């Protein structure tokens, strides 16, 4: 059975350390999403990315800024 694609916000990171920092910060404040392997449509410094529903984009951008996380890119994709 094929998985139905939906629009997601994908945040990439230059290092695994930054990806893990994102996971810790998101869990601490109850932000949506989870770590995933970087989708093949995107190139990133490390192989991990944060994925959440597209509606969470602005909230995640604020979290990244407030927590001092270094994000490589923020994308909205059908995955």
Image: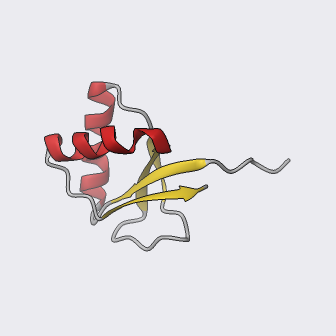
Nearer to the camera, 79 or 58: 58
Q: Can residue 14 be seen by looking at this rendering?
A: yes
Q: In which quarter of the image is residue 24?
A: top left
In this rendering, the answer to whether 72 lies above or below 65 is below
Residue 33 placed where, x, y %? Answer: 45, 38
Nearer to the camera, 19 or 74: 74
Residue ID at (31%, 52%): 19
Residue ID at (25%, 55%): 17
11 on left or right of 76: left
Residue 79 placed where, x, y %? Answer: 61, 55
Residue 52 placed where, x, y %? Answer: 47, 42
Q: Can residue 53 be seen by looking at this rendering?
A: no
28 on left or right of 42: left
Q: In which quarter of the image is residue 58?
A: top left
Number of on-image labels: 0
Residue ID at (31%, 37%): 59
Residue sitting at the far right: 1
Residue 66 placed where, x, y %? Answer: 15, 40
Residue ID at (23%, 46%): 64
> Which colour style is shown?
secondary structure
Residue sitting at the far bottom: 43
In this rendering, the answer to whether 17 lies above or below 64 is below
13 on left or right of 36: left
């Amino acid at each position: 059975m094929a998985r139905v694609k939906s629009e997601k916000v994908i945040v990439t990171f230059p290092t695994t350390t930054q990806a893990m920092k994102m996971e810790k910060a998101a869990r601490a404040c109850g932000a949506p999403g989870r770590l995933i392997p970087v989708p093949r449509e995107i190139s990133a410094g490390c192989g991990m990315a944060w994925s959440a529903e597209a509606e969470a984009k602005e909230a995640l951008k604020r979290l990244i800024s407030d927590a001092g996380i270094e994000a490589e890119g923020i994308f909205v994709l059908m995955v």
